Image (cartoon, helix red, strand yellow):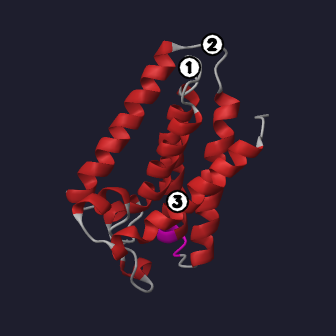
Amino acid sequence: MPKLSKGLLIAFVVTAAAGAGLHFLYDLLPNPVTALFSPVNESLWEHVKIIFWPYLAAFLVLTRGGEPGTRTPWMLTAPLLCAVMLALGWIYYITLGGEAMWVDIVIYVAVMAAGFLLPGVLHPTGERALWGDLGLVLVLVLAGLVVLFTFLPPDHLLFQDLSGARTWATIPC
């Protein structure tokens, strides 16, 4: 079981709050720079940003100056969190047709909380270069995809704006 420290709890709260704030940043300051870090619409993919960027910043701060391999479990966790966020969003919105904001908040907080617990479970007993390299590659690829799909989103349901009332009902089966 991972060790829960006061510092880790504070980092979780600050990170979750930062992600919540990013949700509204583009609406307040619409420009290409804020579009990189903040959802530009209510698509499932755009909401990866509110998990990925704050989590990336948090783990870089939390692991600075650590021994070799300290960042590895965090880097492996980051893409996993984004995948879980997408999967849960897909199930809730697309499969079940849900639209309750409180469910969005619960999913977001639960996924972010998992992001602060999972690295403690995955923490390596010494540096494993292969896993560290894999984690770094996954984080860099995900960051590249976030940037790319901000400006050139594919024509796929994952990238469609789901903000309309009962949007799911209009999706062809």
Q: Quadrant of the C terminus?
A: bottom left
Mark seen at residue 69: 1
Which disc, if any, is residue 161? none
Query: Which quadrant holds residue 159?
Result: bottom left
Residue at 57% x, 53% y is: 15
| Rendered residue at 76%/45% (across/down) | 6
Question: How crowded is the residue under tag 2: few (<14 C-alpha within 10 Å), some, or many (20+)?
Answer: few
The answer, for residue 22, to whether it is visible in the render is: yes
Q: Amino acid at mark 1?
A: Gly
Q: CA distance from mark 3 to mark 1?
A: 26 Å
Magenta residue span: 93-97
Q: Which of pointers 2 and 3 indicates the residue nearer the eye?
A: 3
**Secondary structure type for disc 3:** helix
Q: Residue furthest left?
A: 152
Residue at left offset 34%, top offset 69%: 26
Type of amino acid at the residue the image marks with label 2: Gly
Badge 3 is on which residue? Answer: 18
Residue 92 horizontal/vertical position (percent): 55, 67
Q: Residue at x 59, y 18 (%)?
A: 67
- Residue 20 percent across, percent down from the top left: 52, 65
Picture quadrant where residue 46 is located: bottom left
Q: Position of residue 33 (x, y in %)?
A: 26, 58
Closer to the chain start, of discs 3 and 1, is 3
Q: Amino acid at mark 3?
A: Ala
The reply to whether the magenta stretch includes residue 99 is no
Q: CA distance from mark 2 to mark 3?
A: 31 Å
Q: CA distance from mark 1 to mark 2?
A: 7 Å
Q: Is residue 7 left or right of residue 69?
A: right
Give 106 or 28, whichever is nearer the viewer.
28
